[in-house]
Image (cartoon, rainbow, N blue to C red):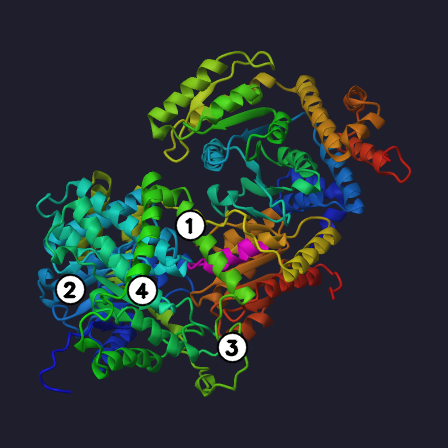
Amino acid sequence: MSETVKRDRPWLMRTYSGHSSAKASNELYRMNLSKGQTGLSVAFDLPTQTGYDSDHPLARGEVGKVGVPIDHIGDMEALFDQIPLDQMNTSMTINATAPWLLALYVAVAERQGVDPKQLQGTTQNDVLKEYLSRGTYIYPPGPSVRLTTDLISYTVENIPKWNPTNICSYHLQEAGATPTQELAYALSTAITILDAVRDSGQVTPQRFPAVVGRISFFVNAGIRFVEETCKLRAFNEMWDKLVQERYGVSDEKQRRFRYGVQVNSLGLTESQPENNVQRIVLEMLAVTLSKNARARAIQLPAWNEALGLPRPWDQQWALRMQQVLALETDLLEYGDLFDGSPVIAAKVQELIAGAEAEMTSVQEQGGMVQAIESGYVKRELVKSHTRRIRDIESGDLKIVGVNCYTQTAESPLTAGTDSGIMKVDVQAERDQIAALQAFRANRDQAQVDVSLAALRAAALGGDNIMPCSIACARAGVTTGEWSEVLREVFGEYRAPTGIDIAMAGQVGSAAMDEVRARVRRTSEELGRPLRLLIGKPGLDGHSNGAEQIAVKGRDAGFEIVYEGIRLTPAHIARAAQEEGVHLIGLSVLSGSHLELVEDIRAELATIGASELPLIIGGIIPEDDARQLLTHGVQAVFTPKDVDMNAIMNKLVDIIRRSNGLEALA
Amino acid sequence: MEQPALTADPARLATAVRRGERRALAEALNLLDDRRPASRRLAADFLRHLQEGQPGDPGHLIGMTGPPGAGKSTLTAALIAVWRRRGLRVGVLAVDPSSPISGGALLGDRLRMKTSADDDGVFIRSLACRGEFGGLSAEVWPMSLVMLAAFDVAMIETVGVGQREIDISRMCDTTCFVAQPGSGDSVQFLKAGILEVPHVLVVNKEDMGAVARRTLSELGTALGRAHTDGNWEVPVLSASATAGTGIDALADALTRHREVLGAGDRLRARRRRYQAHWILKRLQEEFGSHGVGQLGGEQAVLQQLASRDTSLFEQLESLRQTLLQPGGKHA
């Protein structure tokens, strides 16, 4: 390579990580940085994301599982120990509690002697998509939009290099969105948020273009990488037009569509998981090949995420993929490779036309908040997702190693004693709780009370939530206390499930007819229709799997009771009894399956319903599956189980067995 | 399991239901849902025990109906909260439509009625409107008797405003129609005569402002008059389930109607009359007017149902058996 060739600067390279405790995560971060990672991406555990302290009953089994637990300023300080915040670019996947986690970050910066004006990074801070996917919302849409706009208005003036919100189309794709829907709903969300900031009067009209300039996006890239490239070019064009026309932004820099990426995790397979490596690489190309639509920051999942928690080595492999592309190949030496291609231009225009039509539909309904509250958006997403699942089942959508070429030699990658995944230290939750209780005992309670009173006053009165949140952080308020005050003021929300989609377009097949016949026959033998309760216990909000089983179950002839996410074991047990169901199906993706199953069985025993059979689905390692099966769970389903008809048949078999009916041939 | 010890002993089951034991309630509802002949006999037995052990006519059976999306479930949830504050125990039967293709159903109303998991004073059972199975009817009426026996307030929530839903609410003590602001439906219902049934009308979502006020005024002009039931002026109210406004007034109106109905023989006779009409509808649905003709025609059936002192469920069962018998009247 000649010395004179000018190369573009590579994007920020991150790995979404965090687990067990602030201390363990800090060690991991420092190790990752030493390997050439150029930014941090913090994964918080579910109690932190949904505003509960580690010792709250709902947090049981969830502490340190899918991310790091942050209860108070002490944890945040430990998380960034020996990491100078003025030199770091930190992305935080945090939404309902985003103002709080940013407040803690600012308070830690102060302790490090860093001026908040120097801080760089991102708070995801997009609660609207949480109602549609992922599920870590707390408050109703109105107050959530207010918190989001408060954070944006605050940072534009006080932390000017911060990206206050990452409008996410990522999770929409995970919930089933087509590229058109991703474009339409993400941009509609951006409109809702920007309108709210403008109308809040917290930012002067002169400063408003600066707000627009700080809005960034978090995008998904799936395996159809040509179309995905076009999607990002479409985003570019649509955003540029939107901010000029709607908000009158003229400065080219402030009009740029800036985005970060995590490539698709939904499409990663549990079967032949090594194939995920090439999937991840191809998906990365979608967000890097076109210079004019290139990502600002990329984080790649690990090849084994469908199996369980990745180990440091797995994450290192993902980082090396980025480094090879950025440093070894010649990609960064060229201008845009696609400008002038009629094929690309046509596809981009097609996506834009579809997305604009859908955006108009959302606007006609009054905007994104109304379209979410009415259940419209969720229903559209569940429809798309159901279509995808049916195509996989029928083989129209090919997934190598899953519905074709399924024969495989034994993989040496998963042959080790750890089965190729990391195990979270079970002691971590107990340690975290002990440390939290010690922290509470040693703080100045009067100071805490004063700070919380000021927080309540701001929440009620409409003052920006950030200054008093930062004061709370300094005073030693905990995550649960901060969230609880706002719960009391704003209330809690339950989002539409979207599973009431129309039956039209339902595909009949011989296999489906057979399932229905079995369901009908068993219903007749038991005297009443088969009823199935689908429950999502714990704090994990990933509900796509539960929703698909609910829709499929209804199609198969079951009566389905489904109440959405975040239910306590007591609630699930009692609902199952009240509804007279024949079977309870649980869905758990956070890794807390062992604790939650134990709790639900205990609740069932308390109310005299131990005889109800239980099944569970989720990301469940084989060792745990074996353990669950010996502890009264009748069946364990994992992402490997893609044949929905087979799942339904198995449910019928279990109901027959537990009611003393002979097995059907 | 399908028939544990409690269900096998109808007398004990009835006692436990009257005490409001949750497991017994669940099992009783399962039993009434069960179409096997042996279970039907047990169910008849159970309902007889339930009635015998229960002097007087307690409770308040409320039917809540209205178009989809009017917010019936959230309004029900708000009412539950009010009644709980007033120390009343509440049982709800929530009816959802089922798929005409598979018979399957998604029962999502619980989601919007979310109550505290450890509140023993609330019990919700969802029901699918099982079209091809002979209608929701076969279950909802006997189930409402169970809810009445166990709770101070029993509620039936039905989707839609077809004739069937009106039938369901007609068998209740008090029928409440929830109107959706600005949908224009209300005027249609008015024309269809459907709005002559409800005893209380409420326009939900008053937080929508002008649209809600317009609907309120449309309904108000048409219904500010005495109910055909007599001695009752239909109130037309405005509320917002989400904003929590007007809920107390709605609860008061419902209670007032129940008070007007009184107690003792008069109430008992009214309930029996309503239920008899409803049983007749069910027979027509299952066996057609030909079947009812075999039993001597509508008037004969109604007379028979009104006169005898045995439980209505047993009479329904015996009439069904007459028609179902091989070589019986129903060819």
Q: Tell me the distance, in whole angstroms, between the alpha carbons under discs 1 and 3.
A: 35 Å
Q: Which residue is mark 3?
A: A623
Determine whether, in the image, residue A597 is placed left or right of residue A282.
right
Mark nearer the N terminus (1 vs 3): 1
Q: Quadrant of residue A41?
A: bottom left
Numbered disc 4: secondary structure: helix
- What's the residue type where badge 2 is placed? Gln
Residue A373 visible in rendering: yes
Based on the picture, tell me whether residue A6 belongs to the magenta stretch. Answer: no
Query: Which chain letter goes with mark 2?
Result: A
Query: Which chain letter goes with mark 3?
Result: A
Q: Position of residue A78 (x, y in %)?
A: 22, 70
The range drawn in magenta is: A536-553
Query: Crowding near pointer 1: few (<14 within 10 Å), some, many (20+)?
Result: many
Query: Which chain letter goes with mark 1?
Result: A
Q: Which residue is mark 1?
A: A378
- What's the residue type where badge 3 is placed? Asp
